[in-house]
Image (spheres, rainbow, N blue to C red):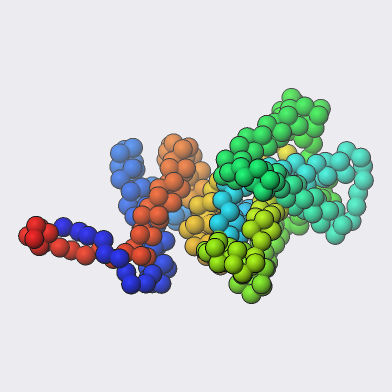
């Protein structure tokens, strides 16, 4: 029989191997699902994990999809390391879309053409402020009324989605858009420059990489980041040291909301170049998985973001080429998180094999 035995101290090796083991087990379960659907397992796995890298264009799409996931997940990592459970990054992302995209739309409809070096930072700065303001609502309700940040941030996602719907079906709807719920295309002066010619990949990815460095420095080299992590790991010790729980709450949520809003501004001004009801396909929720697969570490989040974006692109290819269900990508993402949480047990416990006879004694 198998028994879990507590380790004397957490295993650093298993902390690194757990995501790889979880990925392998997820692939195994995926193969069984492909069999159940009457599909060739090897062809299905190839579609999810090999085909997205079959050409430069496909690779650029993987990186493009990873960009907002990385940016959002960096903010979530700051929150979760601070023991602040922001589940509403999707809503903060959408407010970034509305605020940054709204500025781009206003410049477009007003006929104001600013130099790109001015227009792009203006759009992105407004998207950051929008995301921070939306996260600030959660911080306010938690700080003043002790409301659960989990429930408040999650419920605000649906409010944000309805705000987007209202604007694109109403005041911001393109009158020349054949009645589609979308805004006008933004003026080219507000677009982020392309990074690779002939692809949709833009400098948002470089911004994401720069933010990885900034977040790492903040979390592991600055006193404020140290305060947040102490508050998350040992709240009693943080109070004894005089660290303010209220300040930590506001700092974590504003950083997380600002980065989610920035991701929204990048998507609006670079990928879509307009606002539609489908500007997000659950990126804020997928970023939660990215955050945990990346071990709440900025560098790990890069690889996790690329992995999850590969699964998204693979799901789209599988849908068009193999007739796989659209929901299968979400199933695999959920499986990956579930299996990862199970594998993380091995960080604190080791598996021991005991004979049934020994167990009886």
Whether residue 112 is visible to the viewer of this picture, yes or no, is yes
Instruction: Give the residue at x 58% y 60%.
Output: 82
Residue 43 visible in the current orientation: no
Q: Relative to 347, is 151 on the left or the right?
A: right
Q: Is residue 35 left or right of residue 65?
A: left
| Quarter in which the C terminus is drawn | bottom left
Which residue ends up furthest to the bottom in the rendered image? 221
- The single residue placed furthest to the top in the displayed view is 179
| 130 or 65, nearer to the observer | 130
Residue at 35% over, 59% down = 345
Percent position of residue 220, x then y: 60, 72
Q: Position of residue 195 (x, y in %)?
A: 70, 61
Q: Residue at x 33, y 42 (%)?
A: 33
In this view, the residue in front, 107 or 156, is 156
Image coordinates for residue 349, horizontal then vertical, percent? 31, 64
Based on the displayed image, in which of its 4 quarters is residue 72 positioned?
bottom right
Vertical placement of 98 versus 117: above or below?
above
Say whether residue 313 is left or right of residue 175. left
Looking at the picture, tell me which residue is in the foreground, 68 or 348. Answer: 348
Based on the displayed image, in which of its 4 quarters is residue 38 positioned?
top left
Quarter of the figure that contains the N terminus: bottom left
Q: How many marks?
A: 0
Residue 223 % position (x, y): 66, 72
């Amino acid at each position: 029989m198998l028994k879990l035995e507590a380790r004397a101290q957490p295993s650093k090796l298993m902390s690194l191997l757990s995501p790889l083991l979880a990925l392998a087990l997820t692939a195994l379960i995926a193969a069984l699902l492909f069999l159940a659907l009457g599909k060739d397992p090897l062809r299905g796995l190839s579609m999810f994990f090999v085909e997205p890298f079959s050409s430069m264009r496909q690779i650029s799409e993987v990186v493009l999809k990873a960009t907002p996931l990385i940016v959002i997940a960096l903010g979530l990592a700051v929150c979760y390391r601070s023991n602040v459970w922001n589940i509403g990054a999707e809503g903060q992302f959408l407010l970034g879309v509305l605020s940054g995209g709204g500025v781009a739309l206003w410049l477009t409809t007003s006929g104001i053409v600013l130099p790109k070096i001015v227009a792009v930072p203006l759009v992105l700065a407004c998207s950051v402020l929008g995301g921070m303001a939306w996260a600030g609502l959660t911080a306010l309700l938690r700080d003043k009324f002790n409301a659960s940040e989990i429930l408040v941030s999650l419920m605000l996602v649906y409010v944000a989605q309805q705000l987007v719907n209202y604007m694109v079906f109403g005041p911001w709807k393109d009158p020349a858009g054949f009645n589609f719920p979308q805004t006008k295309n933004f003026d080219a002066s507000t677009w982020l420059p392309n990074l690779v010619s002939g692809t949709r990949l833009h400098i948002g990815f470089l911004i994401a990489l720069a933010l990885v460095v900034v977040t790492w420095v903040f979390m592991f080299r600055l006193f404020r980041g140290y305060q947040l992590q102490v508050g998350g790991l040992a709240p009693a010790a943080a109070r004894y040291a005089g660290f303010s729980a209220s300040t930590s709450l506001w700092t974590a949520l504003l950083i997380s909301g600002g980065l989610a809003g920035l991701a929204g501004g990048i998507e609006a001004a670079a990928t879509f170049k307009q606002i539609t009801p489908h500007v997000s396909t659950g990126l804020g929720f997928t970023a939660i998985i990215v955050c945990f697969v990346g071990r709440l570490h900025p560098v790990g989040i890069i690889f996790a973001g690329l992995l999850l974006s590969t699964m998204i692109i693979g799901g789209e290819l599988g849908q068009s080429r193999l007739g796989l269900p659209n929901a299968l990508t979400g199933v695999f993402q959920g499986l990956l998180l579930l299996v990862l949480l199970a594998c993380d047990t091995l960080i604190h416990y080791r598996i021991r094999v005991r004979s049934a006879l020994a167990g009886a004694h």
